[in-house]
Amino acid sequence: MLRALPALLMLVALPLWAAAPKDLTWAEMIPPDAPAEVPNMKPLHDLSQMSSALSAESAPAAKQDMPNAPVVKSLDGKNIRLPGYIVPLEVSEEGRTTDFLLVPYFGACIHVPPPPSNQIVHVKSAVGVKLDELYQPYWIEGAMQVKASTSELADAGYQMDADKIYVYELPE
Amino acid sequence: MYLFRLAMASLANRRFTAILTAFAIALSVCLLLAVERVRTEAKASFASTISGTDLIVGARSGSVNLLLYSVFRIGNATNNIRWDSFEHFANNPKVKWAIPISLGDSHRGYRVMGTTDAYFQHYQYGHQQNLQLASGRAFATDPFEVVLGAEVADALHYKLGDKLVLAHGVAVISLVKHDDKPFTVVGILKRTGTPVDRTLHISLGGMEAIHIDWHNGVPAQGSGRISADQARNMDLTPQAITAFMLGLNNKISTFAVQREINEFRGEPMLAILPGVALQELWSLMGTAEKALFVVSLFVVLTGLIGMLTAILTSLNERRREMAILRSVGARPWHIATLLVLEAFALALSGVVAGLALLYVCIAAAQGYVQSTYGLYLPLAWPSEYEWTLLGGILIAALLMGSVPAWRAYRQSLADGLSIRL
């Protein structure tokens, strides 16, 4: 009986394994054939300008690197699981976030430009998620929708209707 | 069942203490539920005030501050921003719509907001609901037209066609008024349950017109005055506004536009995501909320301990009662159950009375709270969470009741009919 247990477990686990969404990393969301980044050797902070705050103020805005960065088309319709931080856009009356942007790091650090558009997922969730902390990463499960467009006005980029949202915990 | 009747009869015999004990529990239950309800309703009303807006932009200050003054009309702006900065971003190809807002004046304590037609078209609250007019129309080309929020119209008994005078500054009792340029009520909005209800909406031109002869910070005297009719013929394009709200074509470009605004070369500005700012506000309020909740939990605990004391002190007086019960055939566990039932009955009547008290209080204070704090407290059934709290109180009462039950059990085993008192 005891020896049959692992086998039984395997039988139960295998179909579950097959249905489980594929884990996606943020790097996989940048197409491999995307134009290589030109190394920019200039420091992010021009320290020579530190004495004059006003000139730093009037420096050109740090543009979003690629507002319509290329997306990986093959991800469209794939059932995936992606970890990230939630930036709430719409909060329901019960205090649940139903519409949000998922980003790979929290608190869009003001020293570097915001992440390119292929590193942001616009997620909608009917149930929503109760956010207690903005600093808490979450796993998002669902089917990815990829809408590629050459115009930055249209709905370009990654979108998802989340099936499941749960707290990301550090692997033991 | 006969045990329960016996417990009730015993309680009825000591009705004065019993009623007082139940009343103490009722008060504490009422307090706990009131704190809980105000907390959830405050959160819900904050969350439902703004919807569908992607970015709020104002002079550089703090994100919570900007959210509070631009959306909730709490506090004041630190600075204005230039009209051409607004136009610059309103014409940005990534921007779908833009609503300029201009604040700073009031009418009998209600804030006045200067804005454009875009506000009535694009501003959304609750679950992406647009503003709707209950009667009349939005302001048109004449600068001296005003659209009232539902609460303003109700409280001050205004109807379409009425004339009203705006006051300079935001005090409830204003000494300086724009009485040379009265406004006509042309529309009244439907109730939204948000700060919109407590706002008077005028056009940006109107906002400009009432301040047009205020070059020295006071209304011009004598020949320097500009009459309403003269103002109508002047160029009323504003020089500055307080803040603006943006809706974007694509939500993914939110960060790009936000960064563009924050690093705008023209003037220092701050763009915030309302959802993020709300979250920050809640984490600020969270500590105070928790403290209030803990305090009210302790009040409930005090009420229950009061009940425990009352039952325990009565035990000695009731030794004879117990003994008689034993003599007519009651078993020790009957006595114990009797006492647990007694505690439960006290707690239950306390909880029921507490609920009743809560609803009486809400019904009495509803109007006042709504008009003073803009917080709508519905007379709704207890939520799932509130039921859990009430259930928790009853279980705690059962547990506490088992203490005197245990003592009575021991005593009834030891005591005979004749007790040496």
Image (cartoon, coloured by chain):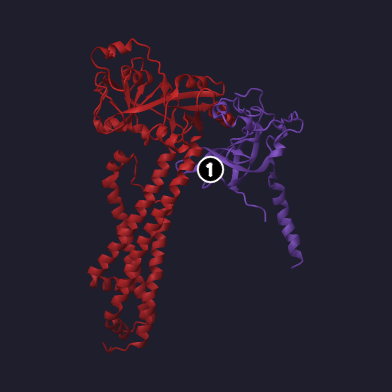
Chain colours: A purple, B red
Q: Identify which residue is drawn at 29% across, 11% down.
A: B230
Image point (29%, 70%), residue name:
B8
- Position of residue A149 relative to residue B317, above or below, is above
Q: Residues within 10 Å of mark 1 (few under 14, many from 20)?
A: many
* Coordinates of residue B99 in the picture (x, y in percent): 45, 24
Q: Could you say whether the residue bearing mark 1 is in a helix, strand or loop?
A: strand
Q: Is residue B24 above or below residue A67?
A: below
The quadrant of the picture occupied by the C terminus of chain A is bottom right
The answer for which chain carries disc 1 is A
B302 vs A44, left or right, is: left
Q: Position of residue A86 (x, y in %)?
A: 57, 41
Please name the residue that numbered disc 1 is placed on: A128
Residue B271 placement, left or right of B223? right
Identity, as a three-letter code, of the amino acid under mark 1:
Gly
Q: Position of residue B395 (x, y in %)?
A: 41, 65
Q: Is residue B209 above or below residue B360?
A: above
Q: Quadrant of residue A115?
A: top right
